[in-house]
Image (cartoon, grey):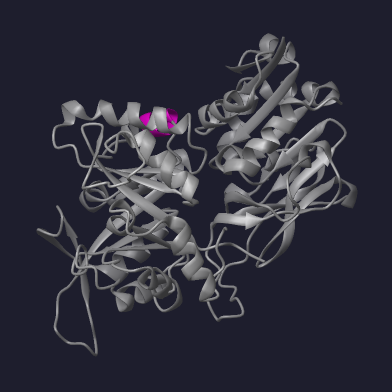
Amino acid sequence: MGLAKRIIPCLDVDKGRVVKGIQFVDIRDAGDPVEVAKRYDLQGADEITFLDITASSDDRDTMVHVVEQVASQVFIPLTVGGGIRTVEDIKRMLIAGADKVSINTAAVNDPEFVRQAATQFGSQCIVVAIDAKRVNGDNANPRWEVFTHGGRNTTGLDVIDWAKKMAGFGAGEILLTSMDRDGMRDGFDLELTKAVCEAVNIPVIASGGVGSLEHLADGIIYGKANAVLAASIFHFGEHTVAEAKACMSKRNIEVRL
Amino acid sequence: MSKIVVLDYGSSNLRSVAKALEAVADSHQSIMISNKTEEILGADKVVFPGQGAIGQCMTHLKEQNLDEVIRECILNKPFLGICLGLQSLMDHSDEDGGVKGLGILPGNVIRFTDHQVDENGDTYKIPSMGWNQVAQEKSHPLWADIEDGSRFYFVHSYYVKPELDSDIAGSTDYIHRYTSAAARDNLFATQFHPEKSQHAGLQLLKNFLNWQV
């Protein structure tokens, strides 16, 4: 009896449409965020994260409408990331029905923004997303730095220090993505995940590298993550969220079944 | 027509609550968001959702005289508090350096203790965020068709500690056992978010809409 570990499917949304090969055989419109979110809800997803990858800010309003539509049909927590830069951006998403927003680049550019957002809206809705990359080959003393822009730009910030700082500024949760593992499908960077989870007192979502259901369980057991996020293993119809939960449950992880 | 008002003091989750109520309402139940005294007092039922920090919540309530409106509603209408809508009913909260609550339910609001360790040696994270089980401590119309021990969605760092056992309607384990739902007469209030708790949450909201006190 206790708090369940969470499984969070993540959807990339571009101009209001889900992108990156969603292949549900029995779905009418695989590009419709509402249909895809409903499908994950049915499968038992604990939350859903939308990542707005729309390049032009002119098209950002579209995301607000997506959230509004999803929130009137799917009654589990929704997180929106991508392009959250101002208090006004946060307000719009929360009013549209998002429960949390995920802040990445804007936090690096102005850490005070996180403090301000947490004070105004409460820590419970402020997720700080950290894109981490290993910066030395020394396996005995690994070090990770915070990157932005999909791993292209380094910030020089140490990931562990940054995570602690963001927790201190009022972040309610950390979404930790290994840029080394992202898309590789060979599992989370467990060392990174464990190091961050043990450094902060707030929940951590592990992300980047999931290629099998066992990887999800490893993230919880060895990485000490409170939640695991994955995209492709669910999108391509290889596995359902329900299968992921059955696998985790078999390994004695408490999940919501 | 039964009028259900979602009380608007500026909480960010009120639209989610209204949407979830709309999803389970029948054609004789109308859902409306309002901060106007006459509309709230004229409603058949009132939902009070809260989110964020309690200091700001109490300040906003007082500024708009909604604290008095809540007191009056609780005298005679089915009333559902959610999250801060539960915590603010208590006497006092430790949050924000100490805040006086509405004092409707005797008891206090306390923060989870930091750095507590579970049986696997892992630290309990604060806020408690995610799906946890609720043990039904008494039978109540709002628990109808909800299995005892069902999971609901929680996100909170503070919990309520009612003085009277008779006010406890549900309890949950995190670090230790605490009260996750309170009930007295026509009042029901939850620490969890029924509007984000899928089937079990929607069933609870439906039970509220159909509740005859």
Instruction: Using residue B163 as the reference point, say whether residue A14 is left or right of it.
Output: left
**Quadrant of residue B40 in the image?**
top right
Outermost residue toward the bottom? A140
Number of numbered labels in the structure image: 0
User: Is A97 above or below relative to A172?
Assistant: above
Q: What is the x, y in percent for residue A256? A: 57, 58
Residue at 55%, 63% (x, y): give it: A255
User: Is B95 above or below relative to B116?
Assistant: above
What predominant SS class does the magenta segment belong to?
helix
**Quadrant of residue A240 in the image?**
bottom left
Residue B84 visible to an observer of this rendering: no
Residue B2 visible to an observer of this rendering: yes
Q: Which residue is at the front of the view, A97 or B21?
A: B21
Q: What is the x, y in percent for residue B133? A: 67, 57
* Quadrant for the C terminus of chain B in the image: top right
Residue at 45%, 76% (x, y): give it: A221
Outermost residue toward the front? A25
Q: What is the x, y in percent for residue B64? A: 62, 20
**Quadrant of residue B186 in the image?**
top right
Instruction: Using residue B145 as the reference point, say whether residue A256 is left or right of it.
Output: left
User: Is A138 above or below relative to A131?
Assistant: below
Residue A93 drawn in magenta: yes
* Quadrant for the N terminus of chain B in the image: top right
Residue at 29%, 31% (x, y): give it: A63
Instruction: Using residue B133 as the reference point, say whether residue B155 is left or right of it.
Output: left
Residue at 27%, 68% (x, y): give it: A159
Q: What is the x, y in percent for residue A117? A: 39, 42
Residue B211 drawn in magenta: no
Q: Which residues are magenta?
A: A90-96
